Amino acid sequence: MFARVILDEAHRIKSKVTSTCNAALALNSKKRWCVSGTPLQNKVEDLYSLIRFLRFYPFAWSFCKKAGCDCEVLEHKFGLDYFCKHCNHGKGQHQNYFRGNITNPIQKYGSVGLGNKGMLMLKRDVLTPLLLRRTKEERKADLKLPTLTITV
């Protein structure tokens, strides 16, 4: 087990089906960091792999919707019969918190109604606590970057 894992260019794991993403998710560590200049590139769903890597609760977890079931899993394990290995309820009874509360409402309703509620939750409950944003202009004195010179 690692004490700390830091993913530089973390946006490269945005697609959860790639071997790079699966390898990053399989890393065992106590602390996790993601560093990226572009954490959100095309769609809100791009953030899920980063949230999943960070194991940010409850957004990275899936929960059983069956009444009285307290099953919450970071990684689904379903058998060939599509029943959860933890609670034995069907695959359709489980919902990922991030998708159910943020991604799906935004995709379905855009920026109105439940979509707006999803956008506000994304900003308030996910981005604000997780994201440290610094622009080059804000850090100009610290970075001491030379001025940009364009020659044609």
Image (cartoon, helix red, strand yellow):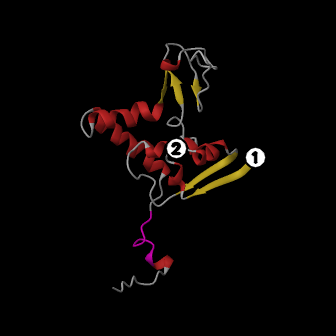
The residue at the point 36 percent across, 86 percent down is 151
Instruction: Tell me if residue 13 comes above or below residue 17 in the rendering.
Output: below
Q: How many marks?
A: 2
Image quarter for residue 56?
top right
Span colored in magenta: 134-140
Q: Which residue extends farthest left? A: 112
Is 100 part of what is drawn in magenta?
no
The residue closer to the viewer here, 138 or 14, is 14
Residue at position x 43%, y 50% in the image: 128
Query: Of label 1 and label 2, which has the lower sequence position?
Result: 1
Q: Please give the label number shown on residue 77.
A: none
In the structure shown, which secondary structural element does the residue marked by tag 2 occupy?
A: helix
User: Quadrant of the rendered structure where residue 28 is?
Assistant: top right
* For residue 105, side relative to residue 146 (left or right): left
Give how far across and how far down residue 39 sits, in percent.
46, 53
Instruction: Sort mark 2 into few (<14), some (14-19) or many (20+) by Cα contacts within 10 Å.
Output: many
Q: Amino acid at mark 1?
A: Met
Quick one: SS at disc 1? loop
The residue mark sitting in front, 1 or 2, is 2
Q: Mark 2 and mark 1 in contact (Cβ < 8 Å)?
A: no
The residue shown at (42%, 67%) is 135
Seen in the picture, residue 143 relative to 35 is either above or below; the reply is below
Q: Which residue position is annotated with label 2?
A: 49
Q: Is residue 36 above or below residue 78?
A: below
Point out residue 137 in the picture as x, y percentages from the top left corner: 39, 73
Residue topped by disc 1:
1
Three-letter residue code for mark 2: Ser
Residue at image location 52% in from the left, 25% down from the top: 63
The location of residue 108, given as percent across then percent down, is 30, 33
Quadrant where the image shows the C terminus? bottom left
Q: Is residue 110 left or right of residue 122?
A: left
